[in-house]
Amino acid sequence: MRSRFALLENLLEEAGFEVERVHLQWASAAEGDVFAEGITNMVERIKKLGPSPVRDGD
Amino acid sequence: MVKRIALVQLSSCWGCDQSLVDLHLRLLDVLPELDIVYWPAVVDYKLADLEAMPKSSIHFGFVEGSCRTKEDEHLLNVVREKSKVLIAWGSCSVYGGVQGLGNQWTIEELLDRKFIKADTITDPRIPEENLPGFTNHIRPNPAIVPVDVILPGCPPTSDNTAEALTALLTGKPYDLPNKTVCDQCPMERKEKIIKKFKRTHEGKIEPGICILDQGYLCLGFATIGLCGAQCPTVNTPCKGCFGPPPNIKDHGAKIISALGAIADMSHEELKAAFPDPIGSFYFTDYASSYLSKIRDKQRSKAKK
């Protein structure tokens, strides 16, 4: 899975997308804290980046 | 009844016509059934001749090439209007073709690179006079007008075109197979564990053994089996020019998914192995990929 993700990141970057908007995280059902931390980090990162230039609407 | 046929060329290499003409004497099997009403590659017809024909008066309209110029778009719309059955013929027509790789850049960047910054140019200027103008990006023809039959290939083999044409003439359905190039390939396959990907000029490809197993990027596993595995059969890796089989939505995504499973390499090595992932994974079909479509939308929005 990690290998696929590495290739996907490569592809996204070449196609001109912000790779920071994509996040891959493993968390088992017993790792609520890991999951929550991953989500919090991603939200913080995305907020800094601002709205995606490719999103629909407005 | 003799069927009226038009063969239309948009921006392309016209290789699909070459492939059709390569039917040679077998052309005689189908030609008596056909009345060629437009085929500028072979017969001297003008656009005005096509424009003057009544609506839906052509039985089969074969369209080759994609819309890089505004005239291409006009021609595509005209042949759609005049044809009962419109066939997207060849990978350019179905997916946008090699020129779809240009969608990685804006049209301004492309024109600048080609007409202003190219090394061999002494009098740099962008040609505009007496020309139809360029389209902003390449879109596959089925995204521009409704298309009834698709026949990919770069080019479709003579047999592919003959088969599709025969099906059309006899009123049988023509559907693309869900098999891949690997299904047609005679090379011997073993378990795939790839430690290093090689470029085709590195080392020597052993005959008879699966080219992907040998560490060369051969895309037969993700490519529709229509060509009869012409390239791998002669020790040349499949570049995926026929595009994916119908059950695969995105060619590059499928390729990444498979490569991730068979590569026994670090992420850095894997990234370094494909410095041009778009050119490697979407040789003729980048314009029909999700990435290209999202990017085009983004650019069109930015222009408004």
Image (cartoon, rainbow, N blue to C red):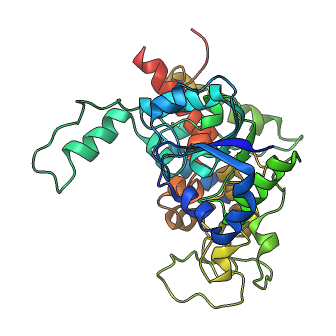
Q: Residue at x 42, y 34 (%)?
A: B69
Taking the image as shown, residue B93 lies to the left or right of residue B98, namely: right
> Residue B286 placed where, x, y %?
56, 46
Q: Residue at x 59, y 78 (%)?
A: B236
Task: Classify residue B29 by image quadrant.
Answer: bottom right
Q: Nearer the viewer, residue B75 or B51?
A: B51
Task: Classify residue B37 by image quadrant.
Answer: top right
Residue B261 visible here = no
Q: Residue furthest top?
A: A58
Q: Is residue B45 above or below residue B269?
A: above
> Residue B151 placed where, x, y %?
71, 50
Q: Nearer the viewer, residue B17 or B289?
A: B17
> Residue B146 placed where, x, y %?
69, 29
Q: Residue at x 85, y 44 (%)?
A: A28
Q: Is residue B83 above or below residue B158?
A: above
Q: Is residue B21 above or below residue B173?
A: below
> Residue A7 placed where, x, y %?
60, 55
On the rendered image, what quadrant is the N terminus of chain B found in? top right
Q: Is residue B44 above or below residue B73?
A: below
Number of numbered discs visible in the structure rendering? 0
Q: Nearer the viewer, residue B140 or B77?
A: B77
Q: Nearer the viewer, residue B118 or B30?
A: B30
Residue A24 visible here = yes
On the rendered image, what quadrant is the C terminus of chain B found in? top left
